[in-house]
């Protein structure tokens, strides 16, 4: 009797992670993207260069890099960025997000359809 085993890869944790399905690194050895204890500086530089080369051709590189910055990923190569690259990107992204949130205009309450708040002007006739 022949047994057939299907390779079932894990699904993304949330719908926001759907981009991972299309990542070139998905079926690769994770050791290329993450350092290990005792890795020497020259070996680390070679490994990171090789990982970044793969990221350059990846169709979801931007989404991956955005995730790494937003989630403050502290380990590994994500979207062509290393831990060191992200150390400067993460604080900048947090400042930008805080600035964006402050600039949002939030209505104090919802209004019934077809009505205006006091500060809204009448449409020009």
Image (cartoon, rainbow, N blue to C red):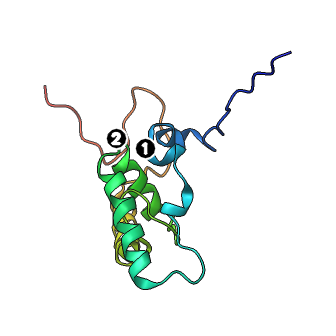
Return the disc, 2 or 1, that comes first in the chain's sequence.
1
The residue carrying mark 1 is: 24
**Circle 1 crowding by C-alpha within 10 Å: few under 14, some 14–19, many from 20:** some
Q: Quadrant of the C terminus?
A: top left
Distance from Cα at disc 2 to Cα at disc 1: 8 Å
Q: Residue at x 47, y 48 (%)?
A: 25
- Of 49 and 61, nearer the camera is 49
Where residue 38 appears, as percent x and y from the top left, is 57, 84
- Judge left or right: residue 31 versus residue 89: right
The residue carrying mark 2 is: 59
Where residue 59 appears, as percent x and y from the top left, is 34, 41
Tell me: residue 57, above or below residue 30.
Answer: above
Rendering quarter of residue 90:
bottom left
Tell me: residue 19, above or below residue 64.
Answer: above
Where residue 64 appears, as percent x and y from the top left, is 42, 52
- Of 50 and 122, nearer the camera is 50
Is residue 29 visible from the viewing direction of this image?
yes
Rendering quarter of residue 121:
top left
Residues at discs 2 and 1 in contact (Cβ within 8 Å): yes
Q: Residue furthest right?
A: 1
Tell me: residue 115, above or below residue 14.
Answer: above
Q: Residue furthest top?
A: 1
Q: Quadrant of the N terminus?
A: top right
- Judge left or right: residue 6 versus residue 83: right
Task: Give the foreground label among 2 and 1.
Answer: 1
């Amino acid at each position: 009797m022949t047994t057939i085993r299907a390779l079932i890869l894990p699904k993304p944790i949330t719908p926001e992670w759907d981009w991972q399905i299309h990542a070139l690194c998905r079926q690769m050895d994770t050791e290329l993207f993450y350092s290990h204890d005792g890795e020497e500086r020259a070996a680390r530089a070679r490994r990171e260069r090789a990982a970044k080369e793969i990221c350059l051709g990846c169709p979801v590189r931007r989404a991956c890099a955005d995730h790494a910055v937003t989630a403050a990923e502290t380990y590994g190569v994500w979207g062509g960025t290393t831990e060191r690259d992200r150390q400067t990107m993460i604080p900048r992204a947090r400042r930008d997000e805080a600035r964006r949130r402050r600039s949002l205009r939030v209505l104090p309450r919802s209004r019934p359809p077809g009505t205006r708040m006091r500060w809204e002007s009448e449409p020009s006739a």
